[in-house]
Image (cartoon, rainbow, N blue to C red):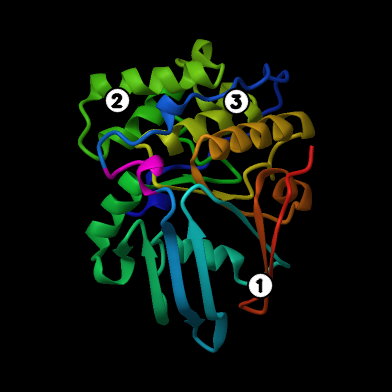
Amino acid sequence: MSVAADYLQGLTPRTPTPPTVPVMTTEHIRGAAPGTGPATVRGQDVVQVRGLRKEYGDTVALDGVTLEIGAGEAVAVMGPSGCGKSTLLNMIAGLDRPSAGSVRVHGEDLGSINETGLALFRRRRIGMIFQFFNLIDDLPAIDNIALAAQLTGTPARQARRRALELLDELGIADRRNVYPAALSGGERQRVAVARALMNRPALLLADEPTGALDSHAGEQVMDLLIDLNQLGQTLMLVTHDRRLATRCASRLVTMADGRITGERTLERSA
């Protein structure tokens, strides 16, 4: 079962603007055991992509892409629709297989892992944030979050305890028993962020994380991503939003026609 199948797309009703997102603590992104968390791989490459090519019939979605993302980096990938940036993210997430080339994440060659192993690897090592939240409609917030750990074998009580800690850190502990349809867009995205952090991933992938939010909620999510990265969380963003990229990333990668066309270091804007 893939990550995309694990989470159902939530609804997006308009509700009052949520309170400001508080700063995360290092406890909530630190690895659960030696060698499993972001801080333990600092100074190494968390992502190594070599000569990546992806073909869908006669269409070439990726054409010889090579990219490294170091531990603790925040990299934004930008480009026009159809340029290959979402395909690249799916390859790094292990949601799709390359036609040629290789992807290594946290030292693991994804091409050498079978589908069952890839599903488990994603749940343990990769956190994903989607544009439309992908929460399960018939589970309250706390269970949407806890499920990510339960799928890796964590006992339900322990999973719910960590889920509540994350909800508290994100300022929405009082919404723990609320179902997605009754949450605002900003609240739902914070639940999605908590779910992505549940297993203390080596890599956090975000696909247009502010695309479905109003400007205020979008600013809150940007601030949260900055806080996480400053505490050591390795982050890759795929976005059309230049403000999101320049605020949250330390490096900008541009793509066109399935290729990387440029890279530059960023100084985060205010």
Question: Disc 3 and disc 2: Cα gap in Å?
Answer: 20 Å
Q: Residue at x 38, y 33 (%)?
A: 30
Q: Earlier in the sequence, mark 3 or mark 2?
A: 2
Q: Is disc 3 placed on a helix, strand or loop?
A: helix
- Residue 76: x and y in percent read 64, 56
Which residue is outermost to the bottom? 58
- Span highlighted in magenta in the image: 35-41
Q: What is the distance, in whole Å, between disc 2 and disc 1 at their CAs?
A: 38 Å
Instruction: From the image, tell me which residue sits under label 3.
Output: 187
Q: Quadrant of residue 109?
A: bottom left
Q: Residue at x 58, y 21 (%)?
A: 182
Check disc 1 and report the residue beneath it.
83
State which quadrant residue 19 falls in.
top right
x and y percentages locating residue 160 in the rendered image: 32, 21
**Residue occupied by mark 2:** 159
Residue 172 x/y as whole percent: 54, 17
- 48 up-or-down from 244: above or below: below
* Image quarter in which the C terminus is found: top right
Amino acid on which the number 1 mark rests in the picture: Cys
Residue name at image x 50 percent, y 47 percent: 72
Kind of residue sitting beneath label 2: Ala
Horizontal side of 183 relative to 103 (left or right) equals: right
Mark 2 or 1, nearer chain start: 1
Question: Do the CB atoms of the residues marked 3 and 1 lie less than 8 Å apart?
Answer: no
Q: Secondary structure at mark 2?
A: helix
Asked which secondary structure carries label 1, the reply is loop
Observer-nearest of 73 and 182 = 73
